[in-house]
Amino acid sequence: TFETLGLYNIISVTVAWSVYVLGFEFYSFSLRQIVGEEPHVISGFVFNQLIFHIAGFLLLSAFSPVLVVFGFIPSNLLIYFILITLFDQLSQECYRICIALDRSQFANFLHFVKSGLWVYPLLMLPLINKNVTIQLILIMWLAGTLIAFVIGVAKLKRLNIIHLKKTSWDIAWIRRGIVVAFPFLIISIAQLTMDFSDRYLIDYFLGKAEVG
């Protein structure tokens, strides 16, 4: 239905927005630090970037119920939104790190798993007279991002990038990253606002059927 399509539209846009906020465009700083470094040094950078993203995820989880209050996302789908945002962001960072490590072919495969592979089973369902519900779409989306994240972590493990026991928290490094990344975040959020804010206005005043 148009209402279901509108709901998916709102969720997908909100995920895109949240991924930018959660990621903070931090990669614009961290990838420059990674290029050309030894694996044990890169491991420390990855660890500290993970700490930063976990803090962002906790804030996202705390404020996400606001989306339910304003009627943008139903309460029974909020958990899917939170988990999709988390694993989409983390798998995206795995993709970017692989690019920085000159593993572009694998990175593109990872991006395909995260963004496209999970769609194909859904396309087959109408052929066998099965309904495609919004919940099923979100489950498959979550599965795609989760699988991409697991594959990405396994690859980084094989490249000796992940040695969390040998790393330490570097708050000064994180602060430098925030300072460098913040202008890029503002630009990205401004662009998303221009492109997609109208969908929230349509949803608020006219309903999700009109968004669809």
Image (cartoon, rainbow, N blue to C red):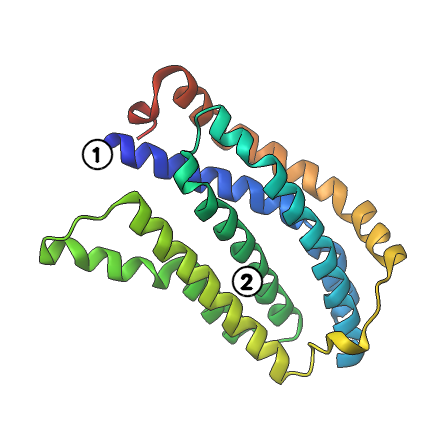
Where is residue 164 shown, x and y percent of the image?
74, 74
Where is residue 158 shown, x and y percent of the image?
61, 84
Amino acid type at circle 1 is: Thr
Locate residue 98: give its quadrant. Answer: bottom right
Picture residue at 68% right of the left edge, 83% below the top: 160
Task: State the residue lying farthest toward the top.
Answer: 205
Which residue is nearer to you in this view: 33 or 154?
154
Q: Secondary structure at mark 1?
A: loop
Of the 4 image quadrants, the one containing the N terminus is top left
The residue that label 2 is drawn on is 91
Picture residue at 77% right of the left edge, 62% below the top: 48
Q: Is residue 154 left or right of residue 13?
A: right
Q: Is residue 105 left or right of residue 159?
A: left
The residue that label 1 is drawn on is 1
Of the 4 image quadrants, the one containing the C terminus is top left
Does residue 40 lie above or below 119 as drawn?
below
Amino acid type at circle 2 is: Ser
Locate residue 191: give its quadrant. Answer: top right
Regarding residue 58, the answer to whether it shows in the image is yes
Regarding residue 38, the answer to whether it shows in the image is no
Q: CA distance from mark 2 to mark 1?
A: 31 Å
Q: Is residue 170 left or right of residue 64?
A: right
Q: Secondary structure at mark 2?
A: helix
Q: Earlier in the sequence, mark 2 or mark 1?
A: 1
Locate residue 47: give its quadrant. Answer: bottom right
Where is residue 205 shown, x and y percent of the image?
40, 15
